Image (cartoon, rainbow, N blue to C red):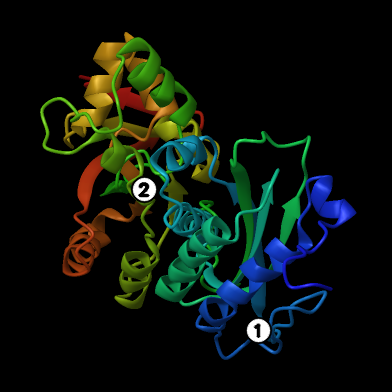
Amino acid sequence: MEKNQTKKQSAYAAAGVDIDEMDRGLAKIKADVKSTKTPGVLSDIGRFGGLFQSPGRDRILVGSTDGVGTKLKIAHMAGIHDTVGEDLVNHCVNDILTQGATPLFFLDYLGTSKLDATVFAQVIAGFCRGCRRNGLALLGGETAEMPGLYPPTGEYDVCGTIVGEVSKRDLVTGEDIREGDMLIGLPSTGLQTNGYSLARKIVFEMAGKKLSDLVPGTKTTFQKALLAVHGSFLKPVLAVRAAGVKLLGMAHITGGGLKDNVPRMLPKGVDAVFDCSSWKVPPIFRFFREAGDVDAMEMYRVFNMGIGYVICVRPRQLKLAMETLEGASARPVVIGQITRGRGVTRLENVP
């Protein structure tokens, strides 16, 4: 082949799937993925399946799968791709944590119309950072280039699967929750990964705002507020358990807010009653309500309203739990109590 002769594009690339670009993307992430390796990992990435050491007798495996939702639209608008992976890892960690499980490994999926190796590497970097911070391994994943299915604008979708473990003794079921037990709230870092379809409509369509505009009443831009990383509650919760506090029930406040998520931990015969005046609602949620003319009760069902995680403990252990959480810089707030009822969330003093 002459020096000035260019290499012919493959038929597959011409159809929209560039295997060479995918190989370049995989080469970029290998070292980052290797940095998440934990003692249980028995294989490197690249095989058809990842290998992990079985946790042993009297251990229960807990698994969960989730996505980031339309927060990905904000990442695409901002051109920032190294946070959504961490969002997803933390989301999944928090989900299995509600049953007392600590994470073992994580598997990711990324689908797009046309793969960009640089963007791909940034997304995976977020996955790896989340895995390292939570002490779990990125064991493998799948990258799918599917022109015609995803929009041709460079947007992508991600989802993840997590597997964790918990001893039978530490399994949290909510079955022991009873009248008089106390509810502790841990603040969210923002929207976490839920409510973005309504948030985008309010911010960009109804209010006509730009990512560079400041959230009213703050010095924070909408870009920073909307892309704030979904926090992990693993370390403070493990600290509480290590302190000897019995974790009766826990809820990760995702889509459905306090109204729909807390009942998932409740046994029949009791309600969770929250005093909404006990914590300060972040300014961005107040903006959504005013600019979007959203009903107050709907706000507490669509958004987390500033509470990212709920822990239920016995009254006699409340002081120890609060002191431990404060020592873990989790900024806990006593936000409610368990009463007789029928297994629902009741909100009082809604501002």
Q: Which residue is mark 2?
A: 310
Q: Nearer the viewer, residue 298 or 317?
A: 298
Question: Image height check: is 136 above or below 11?
Answer: below
Q: Position of residue 122 (x, y in %)?
A: 49, 61
Q: Earlier in the sequence, mark 1 or mark 2?
A: 1
**Callout 1 environment at 10 Å: few (<14), some (14 to 19), or many (20+)?**
some
**Callout 2 environment at 10 Å: few (<14), some (14 to 19), or many (20+)?**
many
Q: Secondary structure at mark 1?
A: loop
The residue that appears at 51% across and 77% down in the rendered structure is 32
Q: Nearer the viewer, residue 10 or 96?
A: 10
| Image quadrant where one finds the C terminus | top left
Q: Which residue is mark 1?
A: 55
The residue that appears at 24% across and 21% down in the rendered structure is 287
The residue that appears at 56% across and 83% down in the rendered structure is 34
- 284 left or right of 39 in image: left
At label 2, which amino acid type do we have?
A: Val
Q: Position of residue 212 (x, y in %)?
A: 24, 33
Q: Position of residue 141 (x, y in %)?
A: 69, 65
Tag of residue 152 = none
Residue 341 in view, yes or no: no
Q: Position of residue 3 (x, y in %)?
A: 73, 73
At label 1, which amino acid type do we have?
A: Pro
| Image quadrant where one finds the N terminus | bottom right
Determine the CA span between mark 1 and mark 2.
28 Å
Q: Secondary structure at mark 2?
A: strand
- 62 left or right of 103 in image: right
Res. 302 image quadrant: top left
Q: Nearer the viewer, residue 229 or 55?
A: 229
Residue 20 in view, yes or no: yes
